[in-house]
Structures are given as structure tokens and as C-alpha cells.
Image (cartoon, helix red, strand yellow):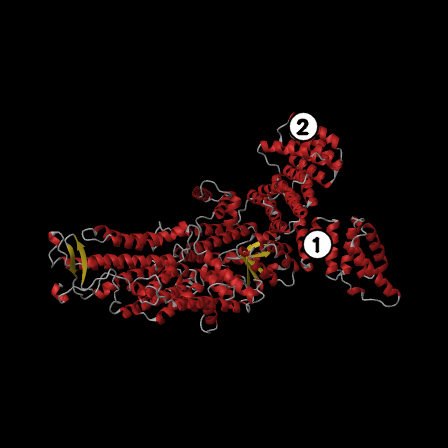
């Protein structure tokens, strides 16, 4: 032990805070940590593709994805550099780079933590103040193993970071976080080196790395304040920062040269990568899709993207998360340190032990970990770095309490023997160190099998199988989390297959990419303004050879909505008129091998860590869905045994697939199989697990088709209620093929009527009334449809039949009112309404027809009264709401009308008259921005919506995009045939495209429909002039000028025509074909 003689007559001065030297053999320890971490990460490296952030980041930065990568400029440069290195795939090379970065980050963190105070100090004694005076307490000599004890807290913190799942994950896959953390910790290491050596070069290096880290990763925003605070403190300590208010000899002096120099380096290092990234962006194909036209646009795009990423760094309640990871442990450690007094060390010791143990538990994501509560991504590593740091601080404080003041004499008698107390405390320190290191190793070891088991075998196999199935296709449509995985796999194969990601359907840059991908299809380019949903629905509905060009991963309804049969493969759906017998036979022959492959995939999925398990579960569920749909195809083709085998395979593969179990139970029961009872019991158990009630139409969208007419009908009606009438028609047609139930036929007629196919709807109803002569519902629907089409004789006959039947007499009265109204007999209709209101004053149908008759009479007050009566009864009738809105609009109360229509479209999105009224109100108020939103919504639901296409075409014509406007106008004309405004717009559009011969027939039809419209006459006159029919053009334009003598455009066209006539008459024929409209 030390004695006073060892101090040579005097005790050394004791600082309040000791600056300890770097422990012995520190370089060897750092090298060992780097080599060990690198070996760990390389041995568990994911050599293949991986979904989620790794695939997204790699696809964006390698330009495989069509969107530009605007953030992480340094990592982007590494990706592009390694892409030029020949050996190996880019995925493998970036994985190795991440492993090296992760090992460097671990080594840097170990170095920084080792520089902290551990309590194994080199000072000979410390001072203690008592009531009797100052007492110096000697410390023991250094012993063997103290170097390891000094590194023990750093080793504990490093093991926590290196072994936690998120950091392990990003260090074994192509990810930016490990590289970003290297830059941040490198800056911190530079500050630590400057703090101990006062070398200005170390501070300059730290400034450069800090600036680069701020440009590279948003994680630097959380750690930069601590690094800057350390740098400022070190500059003050080394007198490199002198301010006038400082005490003693520094008072009144100013020296800020080094801080200014360091700040300049940070700024330069921060700005330079951004400027370089903006310059490279101009040369990328994605620049055009991002509307980057010059360097200023590129720089603004990069800065905006970095700002958005920084804003998303701290999600909702993120500051509370920082309080948990920083504030709480900091208060615990600092408060306990302040409480380290002789005789009061039990509480600090317990606090440090609790801190270190709590960090070990929390960093390895137990069920009570707070990250999901705060919406944190499991791959967000900054909280784990902070936790590792304060865990090391807690361990250092605990060791300090155990190892110092070994010569204390104020202990209880059994512990005051000097030959026992130091031995006990040193052994306690070693036990504590061993236990903490073992705990960290044990917690990290349990991730080894999971990380290795998730080495992308499942995902590589899925991608390979999907690409094999899509051989020969040009496009693969998906809405899955594997879009970038498939894109990268196709790029590595050299396949020309391109992706369409439905999840990106409203991203402007992605929609511009879609438009650029179809240069010869103006309809696709036009609908790209609306959204990818509209593009896909319209593209599949046109069906231009898509069977051989397109495969669908997880949206088979696209094929159904386009009128194709959705043919399932292993993972993809192809379109066909019907599944071929040869393909079904081949699939039946390979069903056993595929079932074994599914079992292998399920085992691989179950081996995934819980953070990654959802990706494996998606593949499992999707494979089960496709196989169930294959069973349905077998059953529809009459191969019931193969269908049963497919359903059984799905039931064995996916314990939660409801569709396959229901199909299996129905097939077994209908075919009289002995297993029907067991299948029924299995289905009932699944229903209980799902909460006791299953919505079959909704479940079938996830688990696959249910071969049941009622389920298909319900899916169709729900789609119709949501405004998706094209999808509704395909679903109801499937139900019709499965059953001849009159209710399904009625549903088909209703969907056709809502779609505007009135002739087809009437044909269905006529067939139904012939097949079921006594069907009252069919007779009423047929009568109502006759009223809508203007067939008053048929409607009157139907009303008479309904009136003599007591069950339909009330409906017959309402139809009679509508017939009188349609014929213009408003007095008779009003009398009927009054009589019905007297008998049934609370009937919503009576109030609705009363509002309609009042509107036809122009009695807006009666419409308002009817609407209020329905509102008091808490009943919403869309027709009355639209009429009330029209009444309000006619009175100039446009705001109230808009509010009412928006509420109606929200409650009943499938009610077309409400949307039409809302669009017309947008036009009346000249609110183009609002109208564009409504048009986009309607076209995403139904690309063939006539009025929405008309407004879309008008927007595009205003922008000079006449090629895109033409198909929209033709679709609008099909839905509203004979409409003079559509005919005129189409003729003008064709004239603008310099196709006067094509424009002339439409212009003539428009004039026939509206002969007194000056604008329409002007269009016809211009078309005649362009086709050299000058005399007729003169007559038409002359009439237009008489109708609108102040219209300068018409007068200009007439003047141009007279000039042409003069040139012809004098033999100087002008180039009439080159004339342009102003």
C-alpha cells in the first residue's frame, strides 16, 4: 500500500476532474476489436438481395429505380464507383463495404469509450474533506490486469453496439447507416485526440469529418452537438479559444482564429458533397423525371430532399425518445456521481448496476422496448449508439467505486483488514466485468443464427422464381415490398424487364417516368397526370396484347377488370381468355414438387428475425393466395381432385388462409367426401381465431378467390358503392357465371345501369323477367329503367302492373309520380306527391320524390324543406342532397353547395350525379386546382368516366397537349354521345393537331346538335377552310359573325378566309393547309 513517505514529504495537488492518459496497449485493443467485428460481419454477410431499406437504397443509388437518389451523396459516390469494379455483383460489393464500415464504427466507438474515466486512475491519492479537516486517502499500486479493467467499460459498450440486431443488420447489408456512423465517430475521435494532445491537425480532421457527416447522414444532427461541445471545451482548455470575459490572465483578450478556421472547414465539407451531387444529378436519366432542367434546379432538389430526410429523423414524440435514451440515463449517472460520498455509496452503486443492466436488456429489443411506441424504425441505429455510450459510462462509474480508496479505515470491522478489503474489491470488479461482458456476448450471440438465417436465401429464391415466370415479358406490375428486389435482380441478370410499382401511383416524378416509358401511347401520357391507378386500369381495359407483355405479381384484379382471366403461376399472374388445359395439366403434374418447395420456404421464413419476419410472411401469404387461385382454376376446369390437392397444400402451408379452407370445405361437402366434417371443423376453428366473424369479400382480396357466387356479388356491389364500376362489373359477372340466382342478375343490371350501359342493363332485366315471370323486383327495375331511357309506354305498363299488386303498390305510386314529371305533367305529379305525403309523411322515398318534383317545378324552398325533414330523421339521401346543393347554387350560395356535395361524395363515393354536380360547380367557380383533384379521384376509380375525361381534356388542351387530349375526348364522347360541346372540343383538338379531315365530321355533328352556337360554327368554318371548302366556310363563318359580331377570333378567321378567297380568285393560291389558328 501507499504511505505518506511515497509522496516524498508532500501530497500532490488534486484536480477536481482527472484527465487520464490512454490506457496501456490501447492500440492493440482497438486493432483486435476491429478485426473481431470485421470477422463477425463478414461471416454473417448477406450476399444476396434483401427487401426493405437495403434494396431501396441500392436501387435508387445505382439508378435501377426511376427516381433520383438525392441524399447520402458520399455513399452514392461509393455505389457508383464500385459499380464500375468488374468482379462480383454490386449487392455483394456494397455488403462488403458496409461490413468494413461497421467494423470501423465499432473500433472507433471502442476507442472513444476507452478514453473515458474508468476509475483505475494513475494518481497516487485522492482528497477527502471531513469535519476534522482534509484527509488524503492513498490508492493501491497498479497490478496486472488493470489495463483490461481500464478497457472493460469500453468493451462492454462496444459489445452492446456490435451485437445489437439493428447495427449488426446494417453492417451486413448494403445500407448507409454504418458508413454514416463511421464519419460521425471519426469526427468525435478527432476531437478526443485534440483534447489530449492539443494538435490542431486533429481538430481540422474532426471538422472535415463532421461536415461530411452532416451532409451524409441525419444521424449526425443528434451527435454533432455533443461533438461540438467537446471541441469548444478542449479549445478553451488548451487556450485556443480566448474570450474577453474569461478570468485571470485571459481577461480582456480575444483569440478565435482556430474556432473560425474549424467552422469554415465544417461548412466547406458540408457544402462540397451537395454541390457535387447536384452536378452529377444533371447527367442522370431521372433528372428529367424530377423536372431538373439546370444546375439550380438540381441543387434545390438535393437540398430539399436532405431537409425532408432531416425532418423525418425525429418522428412523432421523438423528443420523448431522446429523453429516454439521453436524459434519463444522464440524470441517473450524473446524479449518482454527485452522490459519491464516503459512507453513502450504496445508492450510486445500485444506480450504476441498474443502468448497465438496463442498457444490456434494452439495447437487445425486449418486448417492452420503447422503439415501436415512438414509431422508430428498427434499423435506426443512433439510439443504440447512445445507449452503448451511457452503458459504458455506468460500467466505468461502477468500477471506479469498486477500485478506488482501497486503504479506507472507516469500514465495518470485518472489512477494515487491509489484507482483505482490496482483494475483495478487486475481485468484485473482475466479477462485475466478467458478468457484464458475458451478458453482452450472450445477448448478441442469440442474433447470430437469425442474422445468418436471414442471408437472403428466401428472397433470392423468390426473385429468381418470379423472374423465371416473367420470361419474355416487358413489364411486371406490383404493389409489394419486393419491387426493388425484383428490379435489382433483373438488372443483375441483364433482363429488360421493367417494373411498375402501384404504390408510387401518386408520386409526380414516378408518373413522369411512366409517361416517358410510353412515348407512343398518348392515353397513358394523359392519364399519367392523374395517377398510376388510372393508367393501369385503362391500360388493362384496352387490352392491347398485354397477355404476352405484362405479368402481375399481387394485383390480379387488374386482369379481371380488363376482361381477362387471371391465370396463376407460382408467384405471378398472367392474363388470358381462359387457362389452357395444357398449362393446368402441367401445373397439376408439378404440384407435389411445388408443395415441397413451399415447405422449404416456410422453414426459411420462420428462421428470420422478428424484425424481418414480415417480409417472409408476405411471401408465405402470397404463395398461398396464388396456390388457392390455382385450385379455383382447377375446379372451374373440372379437375376437382387437383383442386382439392391445391387447397390442402395451401391449408398445410398457411395456417391463416381462410379462402382455401372455405373452398376446400365447400368442395368436400358438395362432392360428398368423407373429410368434409374435418374440413368444416378446421374452418370453424380458423373463424374463431379470426374473431368469430369473417368478411368473405374482404378476406378474398388477401387470401385469394372464394368460389362462391354471393361473395363475388358482394365484392362487386362494394366496388360499385366505392365508385369502381369497372371492377364491380367484372366481379358481378363472375358471380353470374357461378349462379343463376335472380338477385345476382338484379345486381348485374344495377351495376350496368350505374356504369351507363343502359341497353345492356335492360337486356339483362328482360331476360330475367322472361325466365322468372313473377319477379316483382325485376319488373320494378325494368320499369324504372324504362323511365330513365324515355320509354314511357313500357314504364306506364309496368306502373299499372305494380299498382294492382299490394306488395309493389307503394313503389308503383312513386314511379307514377316520376312518369308524370318526365312527361311534364307537374300538376298531376304534385297532386300525387301531396296525397302520398298525407298517407306516409315519414317515408324517405316519398320525401325524396317530393324534393325531385319540387326541383322540377323550380320550388327551391320545397327542396330545402324536404332536405331538412330527412336530416331531422338522420337520413341521408344522395339525390335530395344533390338537389339541395343545386338549389343553393342557384341562389348564389356556392360555399354551402360545395360543402353539401363534398359531404355527399364522401358518404356515397359511388353516386355519380353528386360527382358530376361537384365538377360542374368547380367549373362555374373557375377553381381549376380543385377540379383537377376531383377529376383525378374519379379517373383513378373509373378511367372511362365521361365528364371527368372531358375536364381532363380541357386542362390538357389549355396546356397545348392536344395529342393527350384526343383519346380523353373520344372516351367522353362514348359516354355522352351527341354532346355538342364534346364534339366541338374534339374537332378543335384535331384541328390543332393539323388533321382537318378528321375534324370535319365531328364539327358537322356539333353544328347539327347546336346550330346557333357561334363558337361551334367557328370551328366548323375553320375545318372547312383547312379542307379548302372555302365557299361553305364563308357561309358558316358569316353566320357565326352575325350571331356574335364582337368576337374577335371569329372575325379574324373570316378575314383570313377572305384573303384565301382573293388569292384563289386572282390565281395566287396561298398555302391554305399551313394556316394556323391564333
Q: Position of residue 241 (x, y in %)?
A: 35, 66
Residue at image mark 1: 970
Report the side of 155 relative to 97 (left or right): left
Q: Residue furthest top?
A: 839
Q: In the rendered image, which quarter is residue 766 located in?
A: top right
Q: Nearer the viewer, residue 368 or 866?
A: 866
Secondary structure beneath dot 1 equals: helix
Q: Position of residue 91 (x, y in %)?
A: 45, 66
Residue at image mark 2: 836
Q: In the figure, 229 relative to 764: above or below?
A: below
Report the side of 1036 relative to 846 (left or right): right
Q: Residue furthest bottom?
A: 86
Please indicate, yes or no, whether residue 976 appears anywhere in the rendered image: yes
Q: Residue at x 66, y 39 (%)?
A: 888
Secondary structure beneath dot 2 equals: helix
Q: In the figure, 76 relative to 328: above or below?
A: below
Q: Residue at x 54, y 65 (%)?
A: 298
Report the side of 437 relative to 379 (left or right): left
Name the N-terminal-most of marks 1 and 2: 2
Q: Position of residue 318 (x, y in %)?
A: 41, 52
Amino acid at each position: 500500500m501507499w504511505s505518506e513517505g511515497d509522496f516524498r514529504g508532500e501530497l500532490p495537488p488534486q484536480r477536481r476532474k482527472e484527465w487520464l492518459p490512454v490506457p496501456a496497449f490501447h492500440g492493440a485493443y482497438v486493432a483486435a476489436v476491429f478485426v473481431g467485428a470485421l470477422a463477425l460481419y463478414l461471416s454473417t454477410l448477406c450476399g444476396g438481395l434483401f427487401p426493405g431499406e437495403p434494396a431501396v437504397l441500392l436501387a435508387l443509388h445505382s439508378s435501377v429505380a426511376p427516381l433520383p437518389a438525392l441524399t447520402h451523396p458520399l455513399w452514392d459516390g461509393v455505389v457508383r464507383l464500385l459499380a464500375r469494379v468488374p468482379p462480383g455483383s454490386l449487392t455483394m460489393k456494397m455488403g462488403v463495404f458496409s461490413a468494413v464500415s461497421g467494423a470501423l464504427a465499432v473500433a472507433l466507438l471502442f476507442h472513444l469509450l476507452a478514453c473515458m474515466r474508468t476509475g483505475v486512475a494513475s494518481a497516487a491519492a485522492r482528497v477527502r474533506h471531513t469535519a476534522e479537516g482534509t484527509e488524503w486517502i492513498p490508492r493501491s499500486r497498479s497490478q496486472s490486469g488493470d489495463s483490461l479493467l481500464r478497457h472493460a467499460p469500453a468493451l462492454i459498450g462496444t459489445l452492446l453496439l456490435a451485437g445489437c440486431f439493428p447495427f449488426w443488420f446494417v453492417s451486413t447489408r448494403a445500407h448507409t447507416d454504418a458508413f454514416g456512423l463511421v464519419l460521425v465517430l471519426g469526427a468525435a475521435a478527432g476531437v478526443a485526440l485534440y483534447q489530449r494532445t492539443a494538435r490542431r491537425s486533429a481538430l481540422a480532421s474532426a471538422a472535415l469529418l463532421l461536415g461530411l457527416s452532416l451532409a451524409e447522414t441525419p444521424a449526425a444532427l443528434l451527435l454533432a452537438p455533443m461533438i461540438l461541445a467537446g471541441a469548444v471545451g478542449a479549445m478553451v482548455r488548451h487556450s485556443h479559444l480566448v474570450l474577453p470575459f474569461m478570468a485571470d490572465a485571459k481577461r480582456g483578450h480575444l483569440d478565435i482564429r482556430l474556432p473560425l478556421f474549424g467552422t469554415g472547414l465544417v461548412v466547406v465539407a458540408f457544402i462540397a458533397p451537395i454541390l457535387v451531387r447536384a452536378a452529377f444529378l444533371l447527367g442522370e436519366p431521372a433528372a428529367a423525371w424530377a423536372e431538373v432542367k439546370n444546375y439550380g434546379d438540381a441543387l434545390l432538389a438535393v437540398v430539399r430532399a436532405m431537409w425532408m430526410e432531416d425532418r423525418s429523423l425525429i418522428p412523432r414524440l421523438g423528443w420523448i425518445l431522446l429523453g429516454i435514451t439521453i436524459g434519463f440515463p444522464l440524470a441517473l449517472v450524473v446524479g449518482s456521481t454527485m452522490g459519491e460520498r464516503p459512507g453513502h455509496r450504496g445508492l450510486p452503486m445500485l444506480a450504476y448496476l441498474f443502468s448497465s443492466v438496463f442498457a444490456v436488456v434494452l439495447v437487445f429489443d425486449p418486448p417492452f422496448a420503447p422503439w415501436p411506441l415512438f414509431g422508430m424504425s428498427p434499423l435506426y441505429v443512433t439510439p443504440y449508439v447512445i445507449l452503448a455510450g451511457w452503458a459504458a459510462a455506468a460500467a466505468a462509474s461502477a468500477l471506479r467505486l469498486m477500485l478506488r480508496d482501497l486503504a479506507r479505515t472507516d469500514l465495518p470491522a470485518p472489512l477494515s483488514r487491509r489484507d482483505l478489503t482490496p482483494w475483495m474489491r478487486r475481485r468484485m470488479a473482475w466479477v462485475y466485468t466478467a458478468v457484464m461482458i458475458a451478458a453482452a456476448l450472450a445477448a448478441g450471440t442469440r442474433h447470430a443464427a437469425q442474422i445468418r438465417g436471414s442471408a437472403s436465401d428466401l428472397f433470392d429464391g423468390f426473385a429468381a422464381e418470379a423472374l423465371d415466370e416473367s420470361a419474355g415479358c416487358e413489364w411486371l406490375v406490383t404493389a409489394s415490398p419486393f419491387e426493388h428486389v425484383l428490379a435489382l435482380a433483373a438488372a443483375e441478370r441483364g433482363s429488360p424487364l421493367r417494373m411498375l410499382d402501384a404504390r408510387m401511383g401518386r408520386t409526380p416524378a414516378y408518373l413522369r417516368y411512366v409517361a416517358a416509358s410510353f412515348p407512343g401511347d398518348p392515353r397513358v401520357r394523359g392519364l399519367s397526370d392523374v395517377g398510376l391507378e388510372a393508367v393501369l386500369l385503362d391500360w388493362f381495359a384496352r387490352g392491347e396484347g398485354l397477355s404476352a407483355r405484362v405479368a402481375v405479381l399481387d394485383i390480379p384484379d387488374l386482369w379481371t377488370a380488363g376482361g381477362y382471366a387471371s391465370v396463376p403461376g407460382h408467384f405471378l399472374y398472367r392474363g388470358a381468355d381462359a387457362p389452357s388445359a395444357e398449362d393446368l395439366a402441367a401445373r397439376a403434374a408439378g404440384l407435389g414438387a411445388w408443395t415441397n418447395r413451399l415447405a422449404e420456404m416456410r422453414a426459411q421464413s420462420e428462421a428470420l428475425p422478428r424484425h424481418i419476419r414480415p417480409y417472409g410472411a408476405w411471401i408465405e401469404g402470397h404463395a398461398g393466395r396464388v396456390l388457392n387461385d390455382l385450385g379455383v382454376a382447377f375446379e372451374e376446369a373440372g379437375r376437382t381432385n387437383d383442386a382439392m390437392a391445391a387447397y390442402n397444400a395451401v391449408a398445410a402451408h398457411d395456417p391463416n388462409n381462410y379462402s382455401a379452407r372455405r373452398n376446400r370445405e365447400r368442395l368436400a361437402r358438395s362432392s360428398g367426401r368423407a373429410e368434409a366434417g374435418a374440413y368444416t371443423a378446421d374452418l370453424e376453428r380458423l373463424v374463431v381465431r379470426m374473431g368469430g366473424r369473417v368478411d368473405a369479400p374482404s378476406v378474398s382480396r388477401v387470401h385469394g378467390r372464394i368460389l362462391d357466387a354471393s361473395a363475388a356479388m358482394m365484392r362487386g356491389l362494394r366496388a360499385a358503392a366505392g365508385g369502381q364500376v369497372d371492377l364491380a362489373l367484372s366481379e358481378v359477372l363472375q358471380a353470374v357465371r357461378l349462379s343463376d340466382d335472380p338477385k345476382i342478375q338484379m345486381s348485374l343490371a344495377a351495376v350496368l345501369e350505374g356504369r351507363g350501359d343502359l341497353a345492356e342493363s335492360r337486356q339483362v332485366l328482360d331476360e330475367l323477367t322472361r325466365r322468372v315471370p313473377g319477379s316483382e323486383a325485376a319488373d320494378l327495375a325494368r320499369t324504372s329503367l324504362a323511365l330513365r331511357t324515355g320509354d314511357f309506354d313500357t314504364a306506364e305498363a309496368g306502373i299499372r302492373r305494380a299498382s294492382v299488386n299490394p306488395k309493389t303498390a307503394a313503389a308503383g305510386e312513386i314511379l307514377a309520380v316520376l312518369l308524370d314529371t318526365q312527361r311534364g305533367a307537374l300538376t298531376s305529379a304534385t297532386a300525387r306527391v301531396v296525397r302520398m305525403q298525407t298517407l306516409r309523411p315519414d317515408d324517405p322515398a316519398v320525401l325524396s320524390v317530393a324534393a325531385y318534383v319540387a326541383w322540377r317545378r323550380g320550388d327551391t324552398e320545397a327542396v330545402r324543406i324536404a332536405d331538412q325533414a330527412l336530416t331531422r330523421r338522420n337520413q341521408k339521401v344522395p339525390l335530395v342532397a344533390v338537389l339541395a346543393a343545386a338549389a343553393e347554387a342557384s341562389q348564389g350560395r356556392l360555399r354551402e353547395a360545395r360543402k353539401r356535395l363534398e359531404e355527399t361524395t364522401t358518404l356515397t363515393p359511388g353516386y355519380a350525379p353528386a360527382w358530376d354536380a361537384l365538377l360542374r360547380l368547380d367549373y362555374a367557380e373557375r377553381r381549376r386546382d380543385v377540379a383537377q383533384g376531383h377529376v383525378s379521384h374519379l379517373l383513378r376509380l373509373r378511367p372511362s368516366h365521361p365528364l371527368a375525361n372531358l375536364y381532363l381534356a380541357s386542362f390538357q388542351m389549355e396546356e397545348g397537349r392536344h395529342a393527350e387530349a384526343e383519346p380523353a375526348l373520344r372516351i367522353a364522347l362514348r359516354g355522352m354521345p351527341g354532346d355538342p360541346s364534346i364534339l366541338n372540343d374534339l374537332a378543335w383538338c384535331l384541328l390543332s393537331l393539323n388533321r382537318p379531315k378528321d375534324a370535319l365530321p365531328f364539327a358537322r355533328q356539333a353544328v347539327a346538335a347546336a346550330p346557333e352556337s357561334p363558337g361551334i360554327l367557328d370551328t366548323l368554318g375553320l375545318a372547312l377552310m383547312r379542307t379548302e371548302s372555302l365557299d361553305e366556310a364563308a357561309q358558316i363563318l358569316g353566320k357565326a359573325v352575325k350571331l356574335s359580331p364582337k368576337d374577335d377570333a371569329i372575325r379574324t378567321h373570316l378575314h383570313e378566309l377572305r384573303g384565301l378567297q382573293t388569292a384563289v380568285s386572282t390565281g395566287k393560291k396561298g398555302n391554305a393547309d399551313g394556316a394556323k389558328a391564333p
